[in-house]
Image: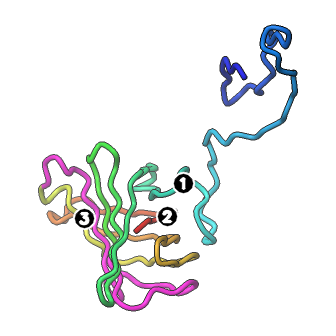
């Protein structure tokens, strides 16, 4: 098969220069669907609707969507830590939950756990380190190698000069 190219807006079509006599193959046409992203669905609370790939975290930070491509979790005793980082290492977000994680349960930040956000990993300072003042996380899928869920939180930076509201948070974390 010779593939020349397509775009998200155009259908994939059979190569018109295909010559069965030259290759000894026959021409067939098969319809396939390829998801090239662009899903703009919101947070429904039932899983991840905006994450493309096997792992990630995505949320709206004061109305601006941020996508963290790396999302991993660890479990140590009764503490579960979910760590998300951008590919370029510019930002990170960490969720820590005390207790046993279960599907359908909601965990409240500052009671059952904490969340922190570092908006500038290259030069961290009190203006770029945020800690939760409220919010929650819920899990829609829990296994030994993957956690899937949704979250929201509000917080302030260490300098207490710039409040942040994080909404429509979704994650798919791999161990």
Disc 1, disc 2: CB below 8 Å? yes
Q: Which mark is residue 101?
A: none
Q: Earlier in the sequence, mark 3 or mark 2?
A: 3
Q: Could you tell whether 66 is left or right of 46 in the image?
A: left
The residue to which callout 1 is attached is: 51
Q: Which residues are magenta?
A: 96-124
Name the residue rendered at 79%, 8% in the picture: 22
- Residue 87: horizontal and vertical position, in percent? 34, 45
SS category of the residue bearing label 3: strand
- Characterize the local packing of mark 2: few (<14), some (14-19) or many (20 or more) Cα atoms within 10 angstroms: many
Give the residue number, with chain letter if any, for mark 2. 172
Nearest the viewer among 19 and 107 is 19
Q: Nearer the viewer, mark 1 or mark 3?
A: 1
Q: Is residue 77 above or below residue 142?
A: below
Classify mark 1: helix, strand or loop: loop
Q: CA distance from mark 3 to mark 2?
A: 22 Å
Residue for point 52% across, 70% down: 148
82 displayed left or right of 20? left
- Local packing at callout 3 (Cα closer than 10 Å; few below 14, some 14-19, many 20+) is many
The answer to whether mark 1 and mark 3 are in CB contact below 8 A is: no
């Amino acid at each position: 098969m010779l593939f020349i190219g397509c775009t998200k807006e155009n259908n994939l079509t059979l190569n018109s220069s295909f010559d069965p006599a030259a290759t000894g193959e026959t021409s067939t046409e098969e319809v396939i669907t390829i998801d090239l992203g662009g899903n703009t669905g919101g947070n429904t609370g039932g899983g991840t609707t905006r994450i493309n790939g096997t792992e990630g975290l995505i949320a709206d930070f004061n109305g601006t969507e941020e996508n963290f491509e790396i999302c991993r979790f660890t479990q140590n005793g009764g503490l579960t830590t979910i760590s998300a980082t951008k590919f370029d290492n510019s930002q990170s977000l960490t969720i820590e939950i005390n207790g046993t994680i279960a599907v359908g349960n909601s965990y409240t930040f500052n009671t059952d756990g904490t969340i922190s956000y570092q908006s500038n990993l290259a030069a961290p300072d009190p203006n770029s380190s945020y800690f939760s003042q409220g919010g929650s996380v819920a899990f829609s899928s829990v296994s030994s190698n993957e956690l899937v869920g949704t979250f929201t939180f509000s917080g302030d930076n260490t300098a207490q000069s710039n409040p942040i509201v994080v909404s429509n948070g979704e994650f798919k974390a791999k161990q």
